[in-house]
Amino acid sequence: MSPSAAPPADSPSDLQSALARIAALENQIASLKLQQSQPQSTQQPQKADVSLEDLPDYVDEEPPLLHTTSADAFETLELKVYAYSALSDKHKHTLYKRPVMNTQQIMDRVKPIIDDVKTRGDAAIIDATKKFDGVDLVETAHVRSSPTHTVMRAPYPAEIIARVPPETRAALDVAFDNIKKFHEAQVEWGVSSVETMEGVSCSRFPTPITRVGLYVPGGTAVLPSTALMLSTPALVARVPHIVLATPPRRDGSVCPEVVYVAAKAGVEAILVAGGAQAVAALAYGTQTVPKVDKIFGPGNQYVTAAKLVAQNDFSCLVSADLPAGPSEVLVICDSTVPPAHVALDLLSQAEHGADSQAVLLTVGADDAYVARVVRAVQEEGAKLPRNKILRESVSKSYVVRCETVQEAFEFSNGYAPEHLVVNVRGVGVDVVAREVKNAGSVFVGRWAPVSCGDYASGTNHTLPTYGYARSYSGLGTGAFLKYVTVQSLTYAGLKELGKSVIRLADVEELKAHGESVRVRIEGGEYD
């Protein structure tokens, strides 16, 4: 795409992270450095939120290369191989980094689309879909059996759902049941209470977000799994109003499998649009699209940027789930694992897009084993229909040879992968729970490929990428809930606690705070 080109509709192979938070931190660091280089003024300096001394003194430093492995498949595929023992902290920091993109350029393209949807509503969605997707929502409305051009409403046409083959329905039903069961276990309804001191009771109870928007990437791809991962926990959380947005296919239709999932999970409306225009419609609302309170789901760089723009606009009061960028996997294995198993664990995430990354950490394995894995990558990859994408994504991947599993966990925690595969003899869930600090979702043992979590084991595949597993969890039922706290005091409890409250209010010079307690205590007890 040329710099002046319009952003395309969403596609899974385009998934990238809009690095707004990283850019903000870099700007803050640059500002601090500039401030420290200026002459000191006579005015008292303001305390900075971040001290330069608190930041790691990391400068990109290329780690020492052990060697590269290469082969003829994938037009001479090469994987860089490093030895953990030769890596300094700076070397590791370099390897932890993901590809960087021009965030400001993306934001500049997204903002006019959002403004247009805010101003013109449905008309802007129709125009943007025709421009970016090549689909006329007006002319193709009959394909969706929909009375409106932009939105399908429940109950959805039976003829669309009937296009889902019985075998596919059965697979979706198994996935739905497992996802539902796992996410039901994550929440306890009702009020939980504790008496913090005599006469002072503090409570907490969950309540669902009223309206949520679920973004399901699509266009040329079929992604009912993402529809399942977003709508099922929303159903479990008892969200009253669920709206799903997904791009139309070339003929203006919506993927029947996505419609089937939407009907099963109680989605009340499907917005037939993708990209920034869909996010804007969910965030601000249009003539036919209900405004939501929170937006969930992965998407390309324009979708991610639009979510950031919307949640930073206080006028629309919308929040977003978590940063979603290129898919990634880190595999820890020993030489007892068949190379084909390792290769396909790597390829299954690398095939998502050219910016995906796959990292292999071997434990106690020699060069011969690494070579066999690379040979398996080339042989298995050559069979896959997305081998053009794989050539690009695998070129960004690498191998680190570790001597112990502790070294592998240390490196993995620094990398903070979206998906972590731990396939080492004798290492089970108990060890993983003790050693893993940063990861989106972990797959333990011989028989737990990432694909199970991607589709049907029950865990959620909406996970933090790009290293955000350091500070974000994967999507769960709690993301669709708010927790309200309650406090109830007796008169005796207020008399005792009030002494501390009044004193702290005086310290902070907030007189009314203290008086609201004092007047009650001095007024005496009453019914």
Image (spheres, helix red, strand yellow):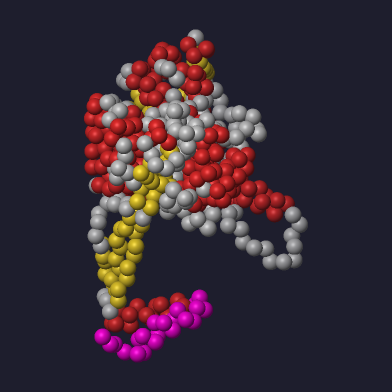
Q: Is residue 262 visible?
A: yes
- Quadrant where the C terminus sits is bottom left
Residue 468 place in picture, x, y as percent: 46, 42
Residue 299 in the figure: left or right of residue 56: left
Q: Looking at the picture, does residue 336 appear above or below residue 264?
A: above
Residue 401 in the figure: left or right of residue 260: right
Q: Nearer the viewer, residue 507 or 452?
A: 452
Residue 144 place in picture, x, y as percent: 38, 35
Q: Is residue 429 visible?
A: no
Give the residue displayed 28% in from the left and 48% down from the top: 236
Residue 71 place in picture, x, y as percent: 49, 11
Q: Looking at the picture, does residue 349 appear above or below residue 316?
A: above
Q: Looking at the picture, does residue 218 appear above or below residue 280?
A: above
- Quadrant where the N terminus sits is top right
Residue 36 in the figure: left or right of residue 517: right
> Would residue 510 be counted in the magenta stretch?
yes
Quarter of the rendering containing residue 358? top left
What is the magenta range?
Answer: 506-527
Give the residue displayed 49% in from the left and 18% down from the top: 388
